[in-house]
Structure formats: structure tokens, C-alpha cells
Image (cartoon, helix red, strand yellow):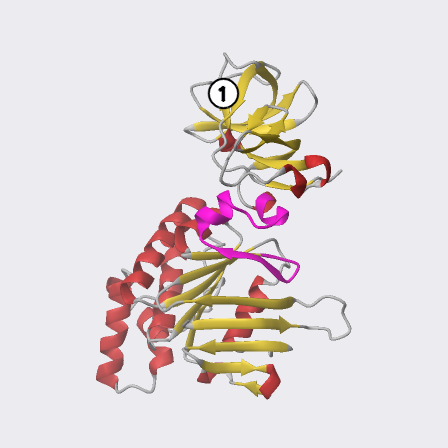
Amino acid sequence: MFLELERVEVRYDTSASRAAVDAVSLGLQCGEVGVLIGPSGCGKTSLLRAVAGLERLCAGRVSIDGAALGDFSLGLHLPPEERQIGMVFQDYALFPHLSVAQNVAFGIAHLGPAQRRARTREVLDLVGLGHAEKRAPHELSGGQQQRVALARALAPRPRLLLLDEPFSSLDVDLRERLAQELRAILKGLKITALFVTHDQFEAFAIGDLIGVMNKGVLEQWDDAYTLYHRPATRFVADFIGHGVFAHAQIVAAPGGSIVRTPIGDLSDMLECPLPEAFEGGLCDVLLRADDIVHDDAAPVKACIERKAFRGSEFLYTLRLGSGERVMAHVPSHHDHQVGEWIGIRAQVDHVVTFARQA
């Protein structure tokens, strides 16, 4: 493992009952991109700062390529400037009085003038700004300024790159494009990176592995497909994607078991738990919007309570006759009205159940 965190803990107030980062363990192979995602205050930026050396560990260990950067048990804390880690921040942190080239060259002052100029041109070309080296930061767009910040972080050839919500101040379309370009750059350079964002789509576009954090705890560290289809906890299931939890009951069936839900029986012979997994077989089943199919011939009917236009589709919020609600992605040419009753059926490939909540 190239980057390894072992039960890392960060506290800002030693008297507080809850740590900002609580016993987090994760790892990245060389060249992998990891993403931390979660609600505000969940600890993702605190964890990033601990890796950078900007926060001291209260427990645990951080290592790169087997060498410890911080180890609480040994009293080891390597200063940030000795960790060979590049950082890209949300606010760019560019020097307004320096040109683009001077900003990029700032972190490689140890190189000779010719080497410094060559490396500056190299990384600016890499981020598509070779033409702008003499311009001032304020003459550039927000997306271009963020590219300069990325070039500056890459210039010293860091062992690890840390990015703290670098695209959050940009518009949605630009964020998505820059996220895809950033991944291509990182993969081309084979740089290991850890990225913090609050945007799920950004996380899916960039990350090889994604960690969902909640109240300082890393709830799951997995690839995007597994996070979405095999959430390890109820929080992850609720946080990722659109969906609801519906009351259900698991009952025995030939060859396995089935889950009885308000929209019909679900079965997944490989994954569906046995009835004894929950008391009386009673549970909550995760029904994502893409698990619900609009079918006017279906016996189950639901009333459209809300709809949100998403271009190629609508996101419908539907109320069943029982009063329970589900969500559904429906092609946008199926433009039904709020208050209209439509037929729906389940098309669930992965049955995900949790202990029932009131």
C-alpha cells in the first residue's frame, strides 16, 4: 500500500466527547485516486489536513510507501514541508502580484533558473495554460486559476497530491469537465491523490476509491459501484443517490428467500438475507429511484407528489395507496402531471436491507 492511514484520530478539543476524525483507516495503491465525501462537518477536511501534517495526530499512523509521516505512539510528526506532498485548495491561494509562471515556479526555487523555467512550462502545458504564463491571476477565469493552482502543486513532483474541494466555487458544467480532466492528468502522471468534495458526481468522476464519512467516522471505503449498489451502512445508503427506505418483510422461499415490499416481492438469491437475519423478518429495504420503473400496465399505482425535470428524465416523488413514498427516474417524454396516478413496478437487481426503524 502506498498511502496508508491506520486508525487515525484528530481532536481539536481534548475535552470533547467526539473526535473530529475517529479511528479512520484507509489505503491507496500507487497511482490511485481516493475521494472523501460526506456532509459538512463530517471530518473529511480534518483528515486531509492530518495527512498533510497541518494537524497533529491524537492517535494512529500515517505513512507513504512504508515510511511514517506521523505516528502518535512514537511521538513522530514530520512537518508539512518535509512530506513531499502537494496541496490544492478551494480558494486557489495564488499570489496576485506574481504572474502565472511566477506562481507556478514559487515552489521550485531550489532548482536552477533553466530547470525552473523548463519545469514551469512543462506543468503549464500539462494543464493547458502554456499560453498564459505571463498573465496575472486576475486576468484568468476561475477554472483557469484552479489549473494554475494545480500546476503549482505538481511542479515539485510531489509523492502525493491532496485536493480540498478545489472546484466548489465553479459552476456545475465546468466542475464536471475539470474533474474529468484532472483524473486524466493524474492518471497520465501516475500520481497518487486524495480528494475532498461534497459533490457525489464529482467523486464518481474522479475516484478509484471513495470514502463516505459521517461524524468523524469512515463509514465505507470502496469503489463507486459498490458504494451505490452495496452500501455497508444505512447512512451510506441514504447519502449516496436518490432513494427511500420502505418497510418490508423477508420470508422463506424455495431456493432462498424473498422480500415483501409495498411494490411487490423482490428476490436476489445470492444477496437476499434469510428471514432470521431480522426479528420476525421485519426490515427496511432500500429502493432507489432507478429501481422503480414506470409501467401503466402494472397493478401497483402511485400518485405523483413532486417532479423535477433533469433534461433526459424526470425525478418523480410518488405516494403509494398505503401512504409510503418512493422515487422514480422516468424518461422526460413521459410528462405526467402532479396529482396524476401512474403504474409502477420494481426492477431491483440488488436487494439491500437494514434493520427496521420507526
Q: Amino acid at mark 1?
A: His
Q: Residue furthest top?
A: 297
Residue drawn at x 62%, y 27% as measured from the top left: 261
Q: Is residue 55 visible?
A: no
Would residue 110 appear left or right of 354 to someone viewing this image? left
If the image is split into quadrants, where does the C terminus sit? top right
User: Front-most of 109 and 292?
Assistant: 292
Determine if the magenta segment contains residue 226.
Answer: yes
Would residue 342 appear left or right of 67 to someone viewing this image? right
Determine if the magenta segment contains residue 277.
Answer: no
Residue at the spot of label 1: 294
Q: Is residue 226 visible?
A: yes
Would residue 123 appear left or right of 336 to someone viewing this image? left
User: Front-most of 288 and 79?
Assistant: 288
Percent across and percent down for residue 169 are 49, 54
Residue drawn at x 48%, y 72% as measured from the top left: 4
Q: Where are the magenta residues, as a range?
A: 213-237
If the image is split into quadrants, where does the N terminus sit? bottom left
Percent across and percent down for residue 141 are 38, 56
Percent across and percent down for residue 179 are 39, 53
Q: Secondary structure at mark 1?
A: strand
